[in-house]
Amino acid sequence: MNAARTLATAARVLRQLRHDPRSIALMLLVPCVMLFLLRYVFDGSPGTFDSIGASLLGIFPLITMFLVTSIATLRERTSGTLERLLAMPLGKGDLIAGYALAFGTLAVVQSVLATALALWGLGLDVTGSAWLLLLVALLDALLGTALGLFVSAFAASEFQAVQFMPAVIFPQLLLCGLFISRDKMQPALEGISNVLPMSYAVDGMNEVLRHTDLTADFIRDATVVAGCAVLVLTLGAATLRRRTA
């Protein structure tokens, strides 16, 4: 990998996104809107929002970054841009790292906005540090970016990219412990949930929700989410194709 080529790729992606206000709005505003709606859905039961708001603060950015990143990367391939870039002295690792850096920059902004809104705009009550909450939200958004880059290699159209959401995201959403504690699930499902990264994203948020200090469980959860993001990015570079068949 070459740092200059990676930065040049990231700068090009950001320039393109600057002319796509709808994608920017989807990435930056949709998680905030969803949190706002959730707060007032439970207006009569603020304790419910406090109990699940932290978890969804991590899940919403993951989902939006997955959706936008997978479609944007696929668009590069179907338009021929990806093939032209890879014909230059630009490695797959440089390309994937550049995309991850560009979308990761937006993920930082997204996570800051969503965390600030949840804590100070909607009154989300957490015991731990706001910085730890922001850290998990950011790691979740980066994981969504990595998953989007990875699955885009297996889609032949933007419609197919969207279809990957039920296959990749929804099972994790059902098994992450948001709806019921994972140790109360059927043992086989609990075993599956233990290897899904979203489960650790939710666990990390819950650690911040319940504990004032940095805990060993939080460090484990954050490390697993970050490690999964790096692993998926590596797989994305290995499976990257020049064009859609």
Image (cartoon, rainbow, N blue to C red):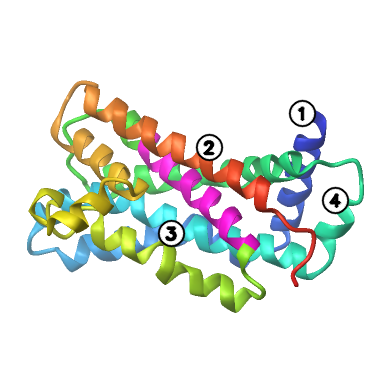
Cα–Cα span, label 2 and label 1? 17 Å
Under mark 1, the amino acid is Ala
92 on left or right of 181: right
Give the residue pinned by disc 2: 230
- The answer to which image quadrant residue 40 occupies is bottom left
Give the residue pinned by disc 1: 3
- For label 4, the SS is helix
Tell me if mark 1 has few (under 14), some (14-19) or many (20+) residues whose alpha carbon lies within 10 angstroms of its own.
few
Cα–Cα span, label 3 and label 2? 17 Å
Cα–Cα span, label 3 and label 4? 28 Å
Does the magenta segment cover residue 138? yes
Name the residue at the right extreme: 88
177 on left or right of 81: left
What residue sits 24% from the left and 58% below the top?
Answer: 175
Does the magenta segment cover residue 209? no
Give the residue pinned by disc 4: 86
Observer-nearest of 75 and 102 = 75
